[in-house]
Image (cartoon, coloured by chain):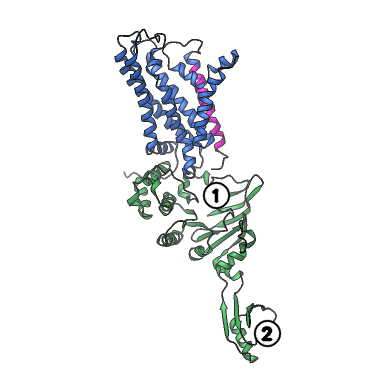
Chain colours: A green, B blue
Amino acid sequence: MIRAERLTKRYGSRTVVRDLSFTVRPGTVTGFLGPNGAGKSTTLRMVLGLDAPTGGTATVAGRSYAAHPAPLTQVGALLDARSFHPGRTAFHHLMSLAHTHGIPRSRVEHVLGVTGLSDVAGRRVKGFSLGMGQRLGIAAALLGDPAAVVLDEPVNGLDPEGVRWVRTLLKSLAAEGRTVLVSSHLMSEMALTADHLVVIGRGRLLADTTVAQLVRDAGTGSVLVTSPDADRLRTLLPTPARTAEEGPGTLRVTGLDAPAIGRLAAAHGIELHALTPEDASLEQAFMDLTHDSVEYQGAAA
Amino acid sequence: MTTVPAPYRITPARVLRAEWHKLWTLRSTWATLLAAAALVLGVGLLMGTTYTSDGGDSDVDTVVLTLYGSQLSGICLAVLGILVSAGEHSTGLARATFTAVPRRLPVLGAKAAVLGGTVFAVCLLTNLLTFTTAQFFLADTDQAASLADDGVLAAVAGNAVGLTLLSLIALALGAALRSVPGGLGAFIGGVVVLPEVAGMLPYDAVETALRYFPTQAAGVLGSATPLPDAPSTGAALLALALWTAAALAVPALLLRRRDV
């Protein structure tokens, strides 16, 4: 269990994380989502005690990360940037971390195997690709057989096979009863992996919800209706429904589902050429949620 | 009776072992230590083979003469000290290190202990080898001496102590500045050059104070005969130890609250 309570981080006059509270529970994959610059990495660094919060607290299993006698068994972490010396081999990097906790060599070899790095364990990290670097970071995270795993953008730089491997790994870690917190700026990735979502934008909590609930909250979607008699249909729609002109003879109807629109049209003898329900995508829900808090917005061309 | 493996947890001895492992799994460690040893031995041999009694250097201390290369090796060892501390920050390894040991202070302590122990051992062995080899060539000159002579062994060891403490000052500067070029600049500028420049000032008080500066104090430790106007060996050792402690106190105090 990872808990953030009113977590705040300021750098001079710039507030990166503001009054952020959320709880990450064991047994599920929690996605930590937000646009670039939303404060995700800063929050994770505060959870791991690397950055000191300006206000508020972050706890792991009830106390601060640093207060644990064996922190690597509490949380295994992969942070956003590379955290190893390029001149050291993968094996020696992991072994030096293992020594701090008295973790045996056999465990180091095990995590190298799990992450598919056994064959390159004796190579210096300097020559590693981005994907191999990510795998080494994940190996380090698993070293202490931790109760919780915190991964910052783990699929960055991985090939499709690697991405699928990470998804499977995260789900299996959660299925073993571990707490899994994984950050991403890609909603599509989280939709495939996460059960629960913590969404932030400009350092503020935007949503703490399930994937299903987020889609529901984003609206039931809309229905595209094409009819030569679109104008008359519009006047007949009951009040909760809203319409927008999509093109000549085409309406986008929200607040009324397709069967209801079809029945209404049939009852009034209105000819329909198309009746297409469109679900609100998770991507759209995320965009709507974070629209006002995107740090670097591209201007419309 | 079956032995239950000790549960995973951090102990100071384990942090020490981790830092020891880190030190010896980088090529830069071997390179800087070998370069330091080779410089002392090389310069020592050069001094031994080229020395003549009527060359005007008769008043130079024998140990200072044979270990003259330590002026150069000191820079190699300072580079090693800075790489050990600041190198973690420039590569990003510090994030992994401080995630594994979030209390942080044991890491600094272990780094200082591992570096200090290694540098002292390497310097002492190099010095003993260099002195005895150089003396082989100096036997028929007025610089002939043996390790059993008054103050010689103490100076050979004192030179190693001086280099060790100077490398720890470099480690402290690297840890405080978290930058390899920054640490190196601070060491060269503040520890090596500054006393030379300040020595040009026409004030006696400055002159006196400078005798207790790290490089001057290290020089006293490495001389078998008392240097003119210099503090005693004990005072020099105390001064150098205090400089080292003060230098290490800076990153130790900063470490706790600083973001990584």
Q: Which mark is drawn over residue A231? A: 2
State the residue at coordinates (47%, 42%).
B91
Using the image as rendered, state which of residue A102 and residue A208 is in the foreground. A208
Using the image as rendered, state which of residue B114 and residue A224 is in the foreground. A224
A157 up-or-down from B88: above or below: below
Q: Chain of mark 2?
A: A
Whether residue B106 is visible to the viewer of this picture, yes or no, is no
Using the rendered image, report if marks 1 and 2 lie on a common chain. Answer: yes
**B170 displayed left or right of B205:** left
Q: Quadrant of residue B119?
A: top left
Q: Within 10 angstroms of label 1, few (less than 14), some, or many (20 or more) residues?
A: many
Q: Which residues are magenta?
A: B236-257
**B33 displayed left or right of A253:** left
B41 up-or-down from A147: above or below: above
Q: Which residue is mark 1?
A: A47
A45 up-or-down from B231: above or below: below
A112 up-or-down from A168: above or below: above
Using the image as rendered, state which of residue B151 and residue B9 is in the foreground. B151
| The C terminus of chain A lies in quadrant | bottom right
First in residue order: circle 1 vs circle 2: 1
Relative image position of residue B146 (x, y in whole percent): 33, 12
Label 2 secondary element: helix
Q: Chain of mark 1?
A: A
The three-letter code of the residue at mark 1 reads: Val
Relative image position of residue A256 (x, y in whole percent): 63, 80
**A172 displayed left or right of A275:** left
The three-letter code of the residue at mark 2 reads: Asp
Q: Main secondary structure of the magenta part?
A: helix
Q: CA distance from mark 1 to mark 2?
A: 56 Å
